[in-house]
Amino acid sequence: MSYTVTQKGTVTIPVEIRRKYKLKRGSRIKFVEADEGVLLVPAIPLEQLFGADKAIKETVYQMIRELQEERRKEASEEK
């Protein structure tokens, strides 16, 4: 797929992509530079993430505890 950037710097996102990623008028997109080039990443509103961690709640809490423990160890080693 190849599209032209307009004089104002805009480009049309193909309808197939908009539908697949549920992009609507007002949707936000992040431009991420990577080794492969520039990636367009949908910015998910915080409201859509509400409750997303219910299925993995305990895993998330365990990861947080591990990060806190690592930080404590690093802090005590620096003293």
Image (spheres, rainbow, N blue to C red):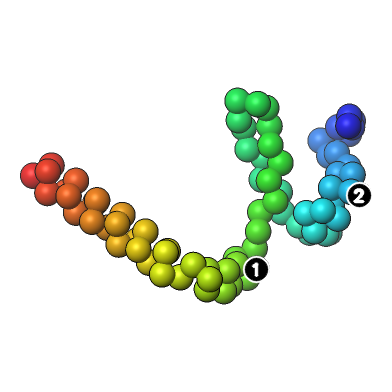
Between 23 and 64, the residue placed more toward the observer is 64
User: In the visual, does 28 lie left or right of 55?
Assistant: right
First reached walking from the N terminus: tag 1 or tag 2: 2
Q: Quadrant of the N terminus?
A: top right
Assign a secondary structure to mark 1. helix
Residue 52 lies in what quarter of the image?
bottom right
Q: At 19% from the left edge and 46% from the top edge, which residue is drawn?
A: 74
Q: Tag on residue 15?
A: 2
Q: Is disc 2 surrounded by few (<14), some (14 to 19) or many (20+) residues within 10 Å? A: few
Q: Position of residue 23 (x, y in %)?
A: 80, 56
Instruction: Give the left or right position of residue 59, taking residue 36 as reference.
Output: left
Residue 38 vertical placement versus 48 (above, below): above
The type of residue carrying mark 1 is Gln
Q: Nearer the viewer, residue 53 or 14?
A: 53
Residue 33 falls in which quadrant of the image?
Answer: top right
Q: CA distance from mark 1 to mark 2?
A: 22 Å
For the residue marked with disc 2, what is the amino acid?
A: Val
Please give the residue where the numbered disc 1 appears in the rendered image.
Answer: 48
Residue at image location 65% in from the left, 68% down from the top: 48
Which residue, as the protein is rendered here, is positioned at the far left? 79
Instruction: Give the x, y percent position of residue 19.
Output: 86, 55
- Where disc 2 sits, the SS reads helix
Q: How many marks?
A: 2
Task: Give the crowd class for mark 1: few <14, some 14-19, many >=20 residues within 10 Å.
Answer: few
Question: Vertically, is 50 above or below 41?
Answer: below
- Percent x, y for residue 11? 85, 39
Taking the image as shown, residue 44 lies to the left or right of residue 54, namely right
Q: Is residue 8 visible?
A: no
Give the image location of residue 15, x and y in percent: 91, 49
The residue sitting at 89% across, 29% down in the picture is 2
Quarter placement of the C terminus: top left
